[in-house]
Image: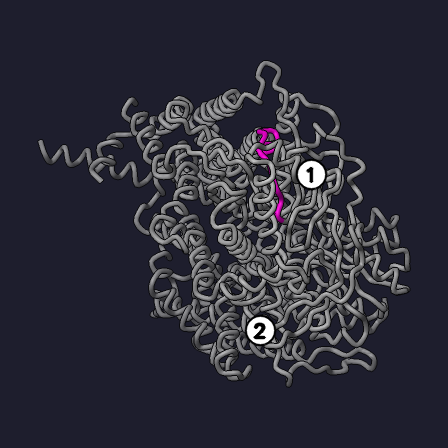
Amino acid sequence: MTFTLLLEQIFNGLQSGVTLFLIAAGLTLILGVMNFVFLAHGAQVMIGAYAAASLISITGNFYVAALAAIPITFLCGYVLEYLLIRHLYQRDHMDQVLATFGLILFFNELIRIGFGPAALFSNLPPSLSGFVYILPDSPYPVYRLLVIGVGLVCAAGIYYLVTRTKIGAMVRAGASNESMAAALGVNIRLLRRFIFSAGACFAGIAGIMLGPLTAVEPGMGEPLLILSLVVIIIGGLGSVHGAFIAAVVVGIVDTLGRVVLPLLLRSVMEQSAADGAGPALASMMVYLLMTVVLVFKPTGLFPAKG
Amino acid sequence: MDLFKFLWTGVKEQQMLFGLLTGFALFPIYTAYADLPFWNDVAMRIMLLGMAAMGLNLILGYGGMVSFGHAAFVGIGAYCAGISQFYGLNNGWAHLGLSLGVCGILGLVISFLALRTSGIYFIMITLAFAQMLFFLFVSLEQYGGDDGMSINRADFMLFDLYNPLRLYYLIWSALLIISVILLFIVHSRFGVVLRAINNNESRVEALGLSPLRYKVTGYIISAMICGVAGTLFASWQEYVSPDIMHWSRSGELMIIIILGGLATLAGPLLGAVVFFILEELLPELLNLVAPSYAENWMIIFGPIMIFVVLFARGGLMGWVSRLAARRMSDHGVGQ
Amino acid sequence: MKRIVVAILAIAAVASGAVFLLPAQNNKVKVGYMTTLSGGAGIIGKQMQNAVNLAMEHTNGKLGGKDAEVIFVDDQRKPDVAKQLANRLIKSDKVDVIAGVIWSNLLMAIHKPVTRSDTLLISSNAGPSPIAGEGCHKNFVSMSWQNDQTPEGMGKYLQDSGVKSVYLMAPNYQAGKDMLSGFKRHYTGDIVGEVYTKLGQADFQAELSALRAVKPAATFVFQPGGMGINFVKQWNQAGMNDLSKLFTVFTVDGVSLPALKDTALGVIATQTWSPDLDNAMNQKFVADYQAKHGGYPSFYAAQAYDTMMAIDYAIGKAGSADTEAMRAVLADGGIPTTRGELQMNTNQFPIQNVYLREVVLDSDGVATTKVIDTVFEDHGDAYAKDCKF
């Protein structure tokens, strides 16, 4: 494998990593700070993708649609929190699992009834379907670079919000000791609603950006939910920068595992055995990584709680 | 409502468990009388998955260890039957023994590693092991990969399982034995310690006991129960595939337990009955009301779960026991 | 205790009574049609259901001249649900034929119980190799194809057109491996890469980057369902068309084309059916389907329609819905379908043409496929020789 190809693959890993981070950022706060097991976070990704795809077909303009879809996803999170989620904070984790599992079924079915069971059409606008040469001889799709860019900007924004602002201080206080924070006058109720809606919004942005790349269909969020859970576990619950590092690591490990591992195996064993083992091992890579991390660091790499 | 109140008055947990078991024992008589042989099949599937859920409940409900990967043990149990048969070993007792052994060893290894973590980390590390096993079996081409392998019903010597009633009662007997074993475990010293660990692990440690040893033992027992369920599942289905190991299947087992009631003996079985009856009935009911939406039955199924959480704390068993308690106090007021 | 037992029996009675408020047995022909209606793959099941209903309209609600009833069941894409439903169709509904089944693993799960019960089982889609070869059964008939037939066509085409090297890609599961081995059966050129992707993979950019480095003249891909939408989109966006030519099986079809539109233009695929096949039955089917549901039917729909037409033909010719009589008629071949008159192999899988089709825009600007060549005429599968009833 040449250096150019390796660089390109690292870019690919980074791109899937930042997308994962957008989903995981909100989830790690919901799980870590609010101590709420929310399984329907993948549905927020789906809502974002559907909102953008249907707005594109109405307005005909990708940029307008993408921007307009962002507040919609925030609003969805807000309404969901108000109607249901706030009644579940005091319940134990297993109740939360059952209720949010019910939510997944409900949202997937709602989308199927509303938009039909088939995947929606969504594609890039011509202005974004070009290429940039990251190295001579290695063209890279503009849109994917844009995804990396938006992801990094969002990451920087979340980092600033959490470490430099008053809201962030409250979030961090809530992460380390919620009742103490409440006693010091933090409005926990509002804080939770804000964290939840913001988390939904970032997951929605991930969905909006994934729309043109992948199939926009009911249930598209569930595989991403599992992966982003892996990310926040490796990063440590409640830790935004942990989630970022873990997301990029997971993205790159997954990408390189898929491409490099079969080649490596082929060089050490015969072709037929390698063809069998390589892809199987590549599928397991992410889970193997998580297991190894947890065996040595049982609360992830950067846990928010001491 | 009054009917339900009447029916469940004063029902205690064990009565519910043995009531359900009696119900399953008598069910074939009813289906034979009403000429509904197909419902025996549904009942067998409910008993098998209920059995797996009961096994998981030992650690999830009583021990507070939320394993999100127990479907893997059901799958391993099924493959113990499938792969043995592939190599010509068709004895059902041997399958069961193999499955107990393999699930026990695997349970030991997985729980020993996984129990270094706790809480949500434990949920995810058990999921990780299950996913790795799932992908392993998907890639095993000689055993059919994800297309699975078609197998014959195992040979249990005395029982010819191609007689549907014998298969039914074999599964029922297994369920009965496991229920009795779990009843003993839960009320034994071991069970008490397991629950104490769930409540306050450091206190148990202060008493000079090693929580890890109890947790690992509990995990192994629950893995073995799931393995037995899986082996019988293979005979019921006459087919083995990785589908039964998928993470959504682990989720299904968890959902059944929470729906029925955590840390109750009858909860998982009751949960399985309600879960699968709803799965059968909702499409049919929708078909009567709004035929064009019959395939969208999950739009009702999902909110039912949310309502159970919101209005029936402690799952269906919690609801039942509260109804019973209210009934008792109503009597008190009446006097 | 007694009360509990009574209660449980009462609930069971109400529950089962609610489901089986069906009228008593009559001499209608009954067909149980199993497909996936709920969940992620519901769109395929919906198309098949539409096609079955259309077929019943075309036969005036009769099969072989007898009053008929189709009972649709939803397998939820779970083998244990499928097994249970098959049992219900056999024991409670006492159907004469069970048809449908999209997925190989589900067909494997129900194959044994259905064929053993002496009920005719007709596949509208799945055709895994174990039940085409040694594990075949006389009560099973395929109205679709054996998995390998379609990729064999593509292998033959690339071989015949002198393509020197090809890069292969399929998901890492059984059907994926079947497709690639089917392709290699007739292609003897250089295979410069053989990549197995994750099942359900959403992003193929890493594989495309690796592919770009190899620059193969041709790329052969099998990515069914949502994976196909993802792959073709990303192939297009990565500008791969300038580097390599894309050849596929079961990747772009009537289900995924509405989500891809002109993104998929120029993609070549082999298939045993196409909406523009020139025979009267196909023209009528496609036109009526479009009129009724808007949009082109997929091959799933066509095969579902063919399945009902085959049942109609078999009952008509045999004079009864007796399993052995119907089977004998179908095994004889000459079945009228949207693919013309189908002949049957010794394992009761069709012997049929494999066409080369290209994605084009029709006169209304809707993406569809057009036949550009016939790769195989009357092509049988490779497993029939191992099948002894």
Asked whether residue B258 is drawn in magenta, I would say: no
User: Which type of secondary structure does the marked residue at label 2 adopt?
Assistant: loop
Side of A142 relative to A212 (left or right): right
> Could you give the CA–CA distance between mark 1 and mark 2, rounded to whole angstroms?
45 Å
User: Residue A165's x, y, as percent?
Assistant: 47, 78
B179 and A291: which is toward the camera: B179
Q: What type is the residue that disc 1 sits on?
A: Ala
Circle 2 packing at 10 Å, graded few (<14), some (14-19), many (20+), is many
Which residue is tagged 2? A122
C64 and B84: which is toward the camera: C64
Q: What type is the residue that disc 2 sits on?
A: Ser
Residue mark closest to the camera, 1 vs 2:
1
- Per the rendered image, the range of residues in magenta is C113-124
Q: Residue at x 55, y 38 (%)?
A: C97
User: Residue C27's x, y, as percent?
Assistant: 45, 34
Label 1 in the same subunit as label 2? no
C330 and B52: which is toward the camera: C330
Find the residue positioned furthest to the bottom.
Answer: A127
Which residue is tagged 1? C331
